[in-house]
Every structure is written in C-alpha cells, then in structure tokens.
Image (cartoon, rainbow, N blue to C red):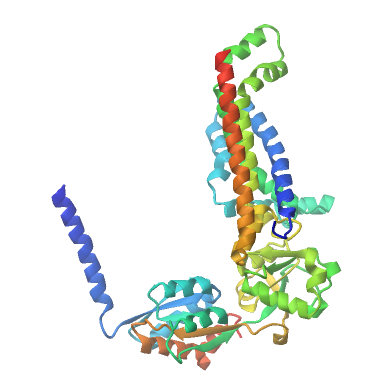
C-alpha cells in the first residue's frame, strides 16, 4: 500500500513538472486575459484571427465580473491583461500599483439601448418618448449594485422619467437578467448595453441613449504588472485599440 | 432602531402564510391518496413531486417563467381571459414558494401516513365509520405531529425562498421585495447594516420555529406513549 502511494505521488508530481517546463518555452507565450463578462462573444471571435497573425501566442480567457477579476488579480491569480467594464475597478488596480505604468487605455465603449420584445408593437423611438402610463413593467439593473442600472438611473433622471416610472421598475440582479425579462416578454421595455441587445435574437432595439445623459461607459484595459509576457500583452492591447480590433468589437455592438 | 422600510417583513409573512396554506392542503391530500397504495409509476410520480427539492432554484424559476410568463403556456391564457398577470406580482412569489416547499410537505405527510397502523383505521371502519370520519377522527390526529413538522418546514422554506422568486416575481421595491430579496440587494450594494438587520430577523424567526416544533413534538410524543 505504501509503495503504491509513493508511485502515485511520483506520477502526479512528474505531471506537474512536465506541465511547468512546457509553459516556459521562450517563444511560446500563453496570454491569460481576464475580461469582463460582457466581452465574451466579441473576444472569442477575435481569438482565432489574433492567434493566426501572431504565431506562438495563445490566448486564454477568464471571463467574470470586473470587480471579481480585479480581486482575483490582487490575490495573485496569474493574469497578463485585464480588460475591465468599469473605470472604477481599473482605478482601484492602478491605486494598488497592480498594473503596468502607462499601459492603461480605453479600448472600447458601450451605449445604453432601450429594448422591447421582438414581437412588440411599440412605436417608441427615443428614450424621451417613454410614457410611464403606457408601461406595465420596465426592466432595469438594480441601480445600487449593477453598473448598467446606475447608468440607466442617471439617464432616466435626466429625462425626469425615473420618478414617474418608480412603481413599474423591475430590477434585475445583472444585465443578463434584465435582458431575459424582456426576451421572455414579461417586461414591456428594458434598458441594457447595446452589446447585450446585439447578441439576443429575441429583442429589438427601439432607441439609443444620448451619451450626455449618463457618465461615459468605457472599457479600460491594461497590462498586469505581474505578467510574465508584458510585451506580448501590450501587443494584444494595441491590437484591441487598433482599427482592426475596434472593428471586430463594433461587430458585436460595441462603439 | 434603524430607519428603514419594514414592508419586506409583512410581505414575506403574507407570501409564506398563503403558500403554506395551499401546500398543506395539497400535500396532505395527495400524500393520503398515495399512501398505502401501490400502482405502476408511483415512484416516478413521487420523484416528480420531490424534484424542486434537488433542482437549482434558477431552474425552477425558469420552468415557472415558461409556464406563467406573459407568453407562457398558462400565463398567456390567464392574460387573455382574465387580464391577469402573475409575473412581477406578489402572487408570483406565492407560486414560487408553493413549488419549492411542496416537496417538504409531501415528504413529511407521506412518512406520517405510512407509519400509521392500518389496523386502527380498519377498526374504525368495522364500526361503521365513513372514510371521511376515519380520516378526521383517526388518521389526522395520529399523523398530526408529522404533518405539523411538514407545515413548519414549508413555512420556513417559503419565508427563505429567493432564486425562483427573483425570476418569477422580480424585484420591485415596495411590491415584491421579500426579506431574502432585501438581503441580497443590500449585500450587493454594500449596505451591510440593512443586510445584517434582515439576516438577524430571518435567523431568529427560523430558529424559534424549529425550536418550537421540536419542543412541541417531544412533549406530544411523550404524551402519546404514556397513554
């Protein structure tokens, strides 16, 4: 029995060793990219084109909410690039000196859109046209905890619609839930990011918000200080801000 | 005391009480009907009843949305005929709560009925008692400790229901914000004082309920065994 245990232990250890030595081959860089969940579809699309053009670079994504990813990186989770959906989380990282100086850049942005179910006969074509008396249920993100909810509240307050809509507001625990409420036809109207509306086949976009109505929704990216491949990481970030990368993201509803 | 809105407490109690009422009736009725009876497919039927107990609440919530949503099978029918919407109302919370707490009631009731001595019911029948009378005078009183346990568990489960409720009833402050909902959104937005307040309330509530049932059933079992 003891003999068996030693053999097993040895086998497991040698697997680890092989794993380690492989990832340290100099030409091949595996980039670990911690990215906000809303970027999922767009980045997976970028993946193959980028890997084709940059031989030896392999992209591995870790999607999650920006706040959680930032916490992971702070606690030492391996990561080369951080793509955040909120400036706040990136500011925190910057304050804690977890990102490489000068690498921070806003690589894309989003706008709010007013959506309805695809079968809806709503004729609204601007946020200003929303008539609270005509709405049964209006789906928004919970403004205290969900970023999209905060932007929505700012917008509706700007248009003096937040108060009149108060009793009609159904608050989702994240942007996907807001989308689901509208997709299944339970809420007449909802407000999500344009990139979320883009990936759903069951909703139609009635109107876009005016950037003046809310704080800018920008996505900052940066190279993580602890990165083992800072140059390859910077290359990837440069690609995202290049014309090509911009176009790739725009195809998924980003601006 | 903190300056805040106490409506989640009242709403939670209302939802849990109404759902427990229906769950108790249905659970007792169905369990009695199925107890001591064996037929093809009984295990399948029972597994179906207990399913909400093991499914993630979001799955239950999704299923309920498909049934009761505005465009759902039952929901669209209700809207068309009665102009009555279940989604995003406190009735949605009641339905979610019924579905998730029914298994607890059913299981307690089934166990209570199955452990009864059939000879007692038969003795009553030989003395000419109707089935109705047998149930109320013999079966129900003997099964009561088990039924009460199921009742309390269902109530507690209804009080704590969150996942399916959020999907079906949504979070509408002042309308569908039960205690668990208030806790979730308070934590998410960093209002720890508010969250702690509701957490303490729900713990005290759940704890006293269970304590009371345990005390009650112990006392009664002693009484039963003594006589």
Q: Tell me if B96 is positioned left or right of A160 in this view.
A: left
Q: Going by the image, does B73 lie left or right of A108?
A: right
- Give left or right: position of B134 versus A234: right
Check the picture and name the quadrant holding the N terminus of chain B: bottom right
Count the labels in the image.
0
For image coordinates 56% across by 80% down, the residue present is A88
Q: Which of A243 and A201 is in front in this view?
A: A243
Residue closest to the far left: A3
Q: Where is residue A132 in the image (x, y as percent from the top left)?
A: 83, 70
- Residue A154 visible in the snapshot: yes
Picture coordinates of residue B164, whole percent (x, y): 63, 52
State the image quarter where residue A76 is shown: bottom left
Image position of A52 with respect to A162: above or below: below
Position of residue A249 measured from the top left corner of the image (x, y, whole percent): 55, 83
Which residue is drawn at the image coordinates 60% and 28% (left, top)?
A: B216
Q: In this view, does A135 lie to the left or right of A95?
A: right
Residue B175, x across and y down, in percent: 76, 56
Farthest residue, direction right: A133
Q: In the rendered view, tell whether residue A216 sits above or below residue B96.
A: below
> In the figure, A242 relative to A71: above or below?
below
Quadrant, the C terminus of chain B = top right
**Is residue B37 shown to the viewer in this render?**
no
Kindly identify the residue that appears in the image at 68 percent across and 6 percent down: B127
- Seen as rendered, the residue at the extreme top is B127
């Amino acid at each position: 029995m003891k003999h068996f245990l030693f053999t097993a232990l040895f086998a497991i250890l040698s697997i680890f060793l092989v794993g380690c030595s492989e990832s340290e081959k100099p030409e091949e860089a595996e980039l670990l990219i911690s990215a906000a969940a809303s970027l999922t579809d767009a980045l997976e699309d970028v993946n193959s084109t980028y890997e084709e053009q940059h031989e030896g670079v392999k992209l591995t994504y870790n999607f999650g909410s920006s706040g959680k990813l930032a916490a992971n990186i702070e606690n030492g989770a391996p990561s080369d690039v951080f793509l955040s959906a909120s400036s706040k989380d990136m500011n925190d990282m910057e304050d804690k000196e977890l990102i490489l100086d000068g690498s921070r850049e806003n690589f894309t942005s989003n706008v709010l859109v007013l959506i309805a179910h695809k079968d809806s006969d709503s004729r609204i074509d601007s946020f200003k046209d929303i008539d609270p008396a005509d709405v049964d249920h209006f789906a928004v993100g919970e403004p205290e905890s969900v970023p999209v909810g905060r932007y929505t509240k700012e917008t509706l307050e700007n248009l003096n619609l937040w108060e009149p809509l108060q009793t009609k507001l159904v608050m989702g625990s994240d942007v996907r839930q807001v989308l689901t409420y509208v997709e299944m036809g339970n809420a007449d109207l909802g407000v999500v990011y344009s990139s979320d509306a883009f990936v759903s086949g069951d909703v139609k976009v009635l109107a876009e918000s005016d950037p003046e109505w809310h704080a800018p929704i920008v996505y900052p990216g940066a190279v993580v200080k602890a990165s083992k491949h800072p140059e390859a990481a910077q290359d990837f970030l440069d690609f995202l801000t290049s014309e090509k990368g911009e176009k790739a993201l725009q195809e998924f509803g980003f601006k | 005391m903190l300056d805040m809105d106490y409506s989640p407490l009242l709403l939670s109690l209302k939802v849990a009480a109404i759902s427990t009422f229906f769950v108790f009736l249905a659970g007792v009725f169905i369990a009695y009907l199925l107890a001591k009876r064996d037929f093809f497919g009984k295990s399948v039927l029972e597994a179906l009843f207990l399913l909400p107990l093991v499914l993630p609440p979001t799955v239950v919530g999704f299923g309920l949305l498909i049934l009761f949503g505005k465009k759902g099978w039952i929901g669209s029918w209700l809207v068309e005929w009665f102009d009555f919407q279940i989604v995003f109302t406190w009735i949605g919370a009641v339905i979610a709560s019924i579905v998730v707490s029914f298994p607890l009631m059913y299981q307690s009731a089934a166990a209570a009925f199955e452990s009864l001595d059939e000879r007692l019911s038969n003795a009553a029948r030989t003395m000419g008692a109707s089935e109705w009378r047998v149930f109320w005078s013999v079966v129900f009183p003997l099964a009561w400790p088990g039924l009460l346990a199921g009742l309390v568990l269902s109530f507690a489960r209804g009080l704590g229901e969150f996942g399916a409720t959020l999907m079906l009833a949504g979070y509408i402050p002042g309308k569908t914000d039960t205690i668990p909902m208030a806790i979730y959104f308070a934590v998410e937005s960093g209002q720890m004082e508010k969250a702690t307040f509701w957490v303490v309330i729900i713990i005290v509530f759940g704890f006293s309920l269970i304590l009371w049932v345990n005390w009650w059933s112990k006392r009664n079992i002693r009484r039963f065994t003594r006589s």
